[in-house]
Image (tube, rainbow, N blue to C red):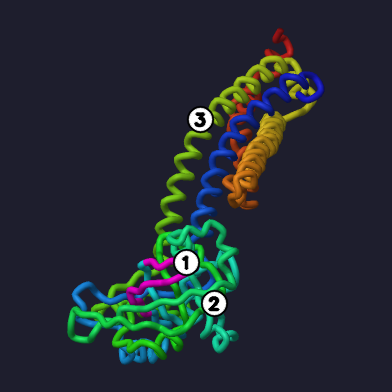
């Protein structure tokens, strides 16, 4: 096939490659979108953490006794609470309504928080961090700051409205201290200034916490610990379940994209089947000669099946090159546009190695299946009739 009809053979391979390339590109888009979304929500130990919050009815609250009881669970590694008070925050001569929040450094670790400028709180720097504050990108937007890095090192102050236990009233407490901005969290939806929990409690009386991150020791403990907390009357959410749901959604998207791509692959397979059938007719006399000099029907089947498999495999390789090439060009183009507009470059097309190996194997199987009918038909030809065929 490669020697006698190289043009037709390579055109068949390219046609098979175009169909395979469509599958590779579309499914690669699905993998890319999945990766972008999951990178935004999955960070380290956050998958092993449960987000616990007070119910709307406030029949139970996360007070210190509750935090201690949760931490006493043998399946729990750590409990990191967070408290929020409404506050007036003053920055660079401007004052705005926002939230003042207090939490341990581990809270950021368990929630997967990221900074876009400066540094985040750590356990090692806990003492120095009592004079520092982490602000959200949303809070800086409130004050008209467009460059988060420019805010690092500047100071702010605030006065908080502390709830009076047992009433709906609040008590305004003015904190006579300037806090230096250590970092800017990427959170755009929250207007908040975050200080360490110890520093927060040194200024305000904390009757109960608003939420807590419960870090379990192992993933197998997520469900039982969650059930136990729910039984106490608290609201619980787990990032791991969100990730599982996101994976299921994107698996569905990938299947849909693969179906669209398989349409082109089906057309290519039909073209390959047509080529193998034409090849059979052209080589009928050759088949007769081979049978006459001792080739068995099995040898003929193997010959045609091997040729079809090789064409399918090469078509898969060409398709991988086409699909990956399209994806990389698109990634480079998006990265260039993002850099010109000050954005962050993302890889919207991604190709896991396992997926590419599957495509190579799948295209070979498609080639084999396409060639099996002509191969079996060739094996059944009568040698004498085949020699006389013109």
User: Which residue appears at 56% of the width and 24% of the height?
Assistant: 270
User: Which residue appears at 18% of the width and 85% of the height?
Assistant: 166
Q: Nearer the viewer, mark 3 or mark 2?
A: 2
The N terminus sits in image quarter: top right
User: Which residue appears at 45% of the width and 88% of the height?
Assistant: 198
User: Which residue appears at 60% of the width and 41% of the height?
Assistant: 362
Q: Nearer the viewer, residue 297 or 174?
A: 174
**Residue furthest out toward the front:** 93
Relative to 388, is 352 on the left or the right? left
Q: Nearer the viewer, residue 115 or 72?
A: 115
For residue 64, above or below residue 106: below
Measured Cα–Cα span from mark 3 to mark 2: 59 Å
**Residue neighbourhood size for the residue with mark 3, other residues' Cα within 10 Å, grouped as few (<14), some (14–19), many (≥20):** some
Prevalent SS, magenta region: strand
Secondary structure found at label 2: strand
Q: Which residues are magenta?
A: 83-96
Q: Which residue is mark 1?
A: 136
**Residue furthest out toward the right:** 3
Task: Name the disc covering residue 180, or none.
Answer: 2
In percent of width and height, residue 114 lies at: 53, 67
Relative to 389, is 293 on the left or the right? right
For residue 69, above or below residue 354: below
Q: Which residue is mark 3?
A: 263
**Residue neighbourhood size for the residue with mark 2, other residues' Cα within 10 Å, grouped as few (<14), some (14–19), many (≥20):** some
Q: Is residue 91 part of the magenta span, yes or no?
A: yes
Secondary structure found at label 1: strand
Q: Answer yes or no: do the residues labelled 3 and 1 have beta carbons within 8 Å?
A: no
Q: Nearer the viewer, residue 245 or 65?
A: 65
Secondary structure found at label 3: helix
In percent of width and height, residue 348 lies at: 57, 46
């Amino acid at each position: 096939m490669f020697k006698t009809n190289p043009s037709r053979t390579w055109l068949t391979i390219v046609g098979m490659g175009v169909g395979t390339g469509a599958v590779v590109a579309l499914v690669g888009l699905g993998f890319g979108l999945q990766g972008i979304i999951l990178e935004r929500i999955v960070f380290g130990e956050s998958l092993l953490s449960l987000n616990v919050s007070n119910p709307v009815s406030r029949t139970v609250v996360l007070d210190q006794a509750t935090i201690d009881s949760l931490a006493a669970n043998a399946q729990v590694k750590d409990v990191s609470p967070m408290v929020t008070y409404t506050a007036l925050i003053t920055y660079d001569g401007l004052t705005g309504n926002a939230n003042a929040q207090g939490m341990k450094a581990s809270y950021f670790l368990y929630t997967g928080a990221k900074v876009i400028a400066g540094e985040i709180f750590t356990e090692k720097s806990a003492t120095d961090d009592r004079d520092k504050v982490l602000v959200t990108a949303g809070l800086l937007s409130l004050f008209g700051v467009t460059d988060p890095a420019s805010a690092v090192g500047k100071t702010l102050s605030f006065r908080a409205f502390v709830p009076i236990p047992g009433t709906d009233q609040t008590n305004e407490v003015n904190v006579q201290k300037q806090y230096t901005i250590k970092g800017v969290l990427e959170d755009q939806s929250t207007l908040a200034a975050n200080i360490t929990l110890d520093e927060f409690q040194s200024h305000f009386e904390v009757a109960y916490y608003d939420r807590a991150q419960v870090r379990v020791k192992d993933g197998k403990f997520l469900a039982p610990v969650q059930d136990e907390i729910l039984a106490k009357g608290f609201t619980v959410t787990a990032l791991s379940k969100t990730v599982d749901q996101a994976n299921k959604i994107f698996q569905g998207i990938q299947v849909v994209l693969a179906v669209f791509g398989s349409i082109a692959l089906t057309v290519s397979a039909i073209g390959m089947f047509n080529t193998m059938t034409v090849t059979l007719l052209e080589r009928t006399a050759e088949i007769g000669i081979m049978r006459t000099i001792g080739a068995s029907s099995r040898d003929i089947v193997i010959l045609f099946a091997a040729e079809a498999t090789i064409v399918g495999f090469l078509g898969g390789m060409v398709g991988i090159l086409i699909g990956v090439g399209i994806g990389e060009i698109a990634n480079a183009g998006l990265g260039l546009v993002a850099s010109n507009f000050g954005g962050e470059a993302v890889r919207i097309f991604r190709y896991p190695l396992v997926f590419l190996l599957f495509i190579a194997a799948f295209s070979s199987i498609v080639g084999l299946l396409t060639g099996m009918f002509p191969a079996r038909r060739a094996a059944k030809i009568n040698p004498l009739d085949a020699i006389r065929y013109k």
